[in-house]
Amino acid sequence: MLTGKQKRFLRSKAHHLSAIFQVGKGGTNENMIEQIKEALEARELIKVSVLQNCEYDKDEVAKAITKGAKAQLVQVIGNTIVVYKASKENASLVLPR
């Protein structure tokens, strides 16, 4: 689990990022979860945008993504979800203790 201090740190790092995934009408699926896993391995910190036509609540989408990708939810703000997962190969973010 992430501490409040770590979440603040990750939010500050994610601030300038743009969303690289969009969840639309169909919600999340296996293929999208796999792509998110690969993106998290490469980047560690990503943003996912939930579009207006999405049938699911943004909190449900966030839960599906974090569970499927075995990642940590940093923040849900507006229609944007910020997700973190430490990379095995490309670790670049050092979390504060």
Image (spheres, helix red, strand yellow):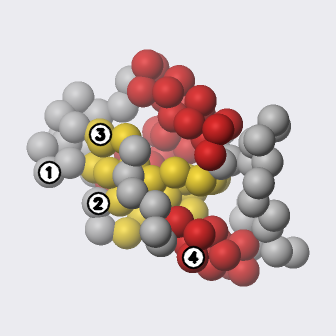
- Label 1, secondary structure: give it: loop
Instruction: Give the residue at mark 3.
Output: 23
Q: Earlier in the sequence, mark 1 or mark 3?
A: 3
Query: Is residue 58 in sight in this rendering?
Result: yes
- Does residue 8 lie above or below 71 as drawn? below
Q: Can residue 67 be seen in this view?
A: no
Helix, strand or loop under label 2: loop
Q: Which mark is residue 79?
A: 2
Q: Which amino acid does label 2 sit on?
A: Asn
Q: Which residue is drawn at 48% across and 46% down?
A: 63
Q: List the residue tagged with mark 1.
A: 52
Total marks placed = 4
Quarter of the view holding residue 24: top left
Work out how far the residue at label 1 is from the one at label 4, CA to CA, in angstroms: 25 Å
Write the residue at 17% across / 34% down. Answer: 25
Frontmost residue, 92 versus 63: 92
Residue 83 is situated, as x and y percent measured from the top left of the image, at 55, 53
Name which residue type carries label 1.
Gln
Residues tagged 1 and 2 counted as in contact (Cβ below 8 A): yes
- Going from N to C along the chain, the mark reached first, 4 or 3, is 4
Q: Nearer the viewer, mark 4 or mark 3?
A: 4
Q: Name the residue under label 4.
A: 12
20, 79: nearer the viewer = 20
Residue 6 lies, in percent from the top left, at 72, 73
In the image, residue 14 sits, relative to residue 47, either above or below, namely: below
The correct choice, above or below, for 47 with respect to 5 in the image is above
Q: From the viewer's perspective, tell me whether residue 29 is left or right of residue 4.
A: left
Badge 3 crowding class, 10 Å Cα cut-off, few under 14, some 14 to 19, many 20 or more, is many
Mark 4–mark 2 distance (CA, rounded to whole Å)? 18 Å
Q: In this view, does 29 lie to the left or right of 43?
A: left
- Mark closest to the chain's N terminus, 3 or 2: 3
74 w.r.t. 83: above or below = below
